[in-house]
Amino acid sequence: MTRSLRLTLTVATAAVAALALSACASGSSSADGTVTDGKLTIATGQPAYSPWVEDNKPQSGKGFESAVAYAVAKEMGYAKSDVVWKRSTFDSAIAPGPKDWDLNIQQFSIDAKRKKAVDMSSAYYTTTQAVVTTAKSKAVDHTTIDALKKDAIGVATGSTSIASVKSVLGVTPQVFNSNDDAVLALKSGQIDAIVTDLPTAFTMASAQLDDGTVSAQFPADGKGDQFGFVLPKASELTSKVDKALAALQKDGTLEDLQTKWLSSETGTPVLK
């Protein structure tokens, strides 16, 4: 074998290896940039909870994030039958490395640190503040600002909920060291309700309180955490997802889905 031929083979081998590494880094090798040609593989948590996914069945399209995922897929040109669901943990989704899915949706807050390891889409939802109370509390039926401002409200220290209570209700809440401490205060009757972000409110009501309920949510002010899809780093699909979300925002689809799954279906009215 001549030196020139060896050099040519070496260069060719290196090029093939580089292409292979590139494909592994993004987790995709198909013509359309997905892990499986012609399919859009979307991951979510196991289990996935209401109101984000109903009955732990993301394939049903029921639940806010399931519905958003299918709306984005449709906007990107994928039929419902072309969407494949997988499960992943929250931590593995935002860790560096190749993925076996194209998109992941499970209430990921968009932040710069996560973007160093993975791609994140533009926002499909900005969290609002919500009211958590119990069936025994006098606050359970207080779904207006005038009624709620008369209740003893608790919040966790350092949270944006403090400013929201002062701004919207015009009162100063009782501040606790943590959400757990606020829950204990609610259970003991020290306070009538807790104000926290809506995702935390649903978890708190279902997992920490025997008779908990999310009785109301604050009007959207655009200041909450923004949720976005996670994608493999340098994914070819990131710009396409952003474009789809922009279209869904413009035509009102995202707002309609938010109203349906986070207000109407859960019976969580917006304070007025």
Image (cartoon, rainbow, N blue to C red):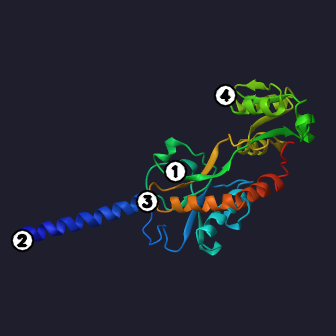
| Residue located farthest toward the front when viewing the structure as drawn | 250
Label 3 amino acid? Answer: Ser
Question: Relative to residue 32, is residue 124 depicted above or below?
Answer: above
Residue 4 seen in render: yes
Q: Quadrant of residue 22?
A: bottom left
| Residue at 23 percent of width and 66 percent of height | 13
Secondary structure of residue under mark 4: loop
Front-lying residue, 140 or 92: 140
- The x, y position of residue 70, in whole percent, is 65, 66
In the drawing, what numbered circle is on residue 26?
3
| Residue at 91 percent of width and 39 percent of height | 142
Secondary structure of residue under mark 2: loop
Answer with mark 3 or mark 4, whichever residue precedes in sequence: 3
Label 4 amino acid? Answer: Gly
Answer with mark 4 or mark 2, whichever residue precedes in sequence: 2
In the drawing, what numbered circle is on residue 158?
4
Question: Relative to residue 147, is residue 124 depicted above or below?
Answer: below
Answer with mark 1 or mark 4, whichever residue precedes in sequence: 1
Q: CA distance from mark 3 to mark 4?
A: 37 Å
Q: Quadrant of the N terminus?
A: bottom left
Answer with mark 2 or mark 3, whichever residue precedes in sequence: 2
Name the mark nearer the viewer: 1 or 4.
Answer: 4
Secondary structure of residue under mark 3: helix
How packed mark 4 is, by other alpha carbons closer than 10 Å (few <14, some 14-19, many 20 or more), is few
Label 1 amino acid? Answer: Ser
In the drawing, what numbered circle is on residue 92?
1
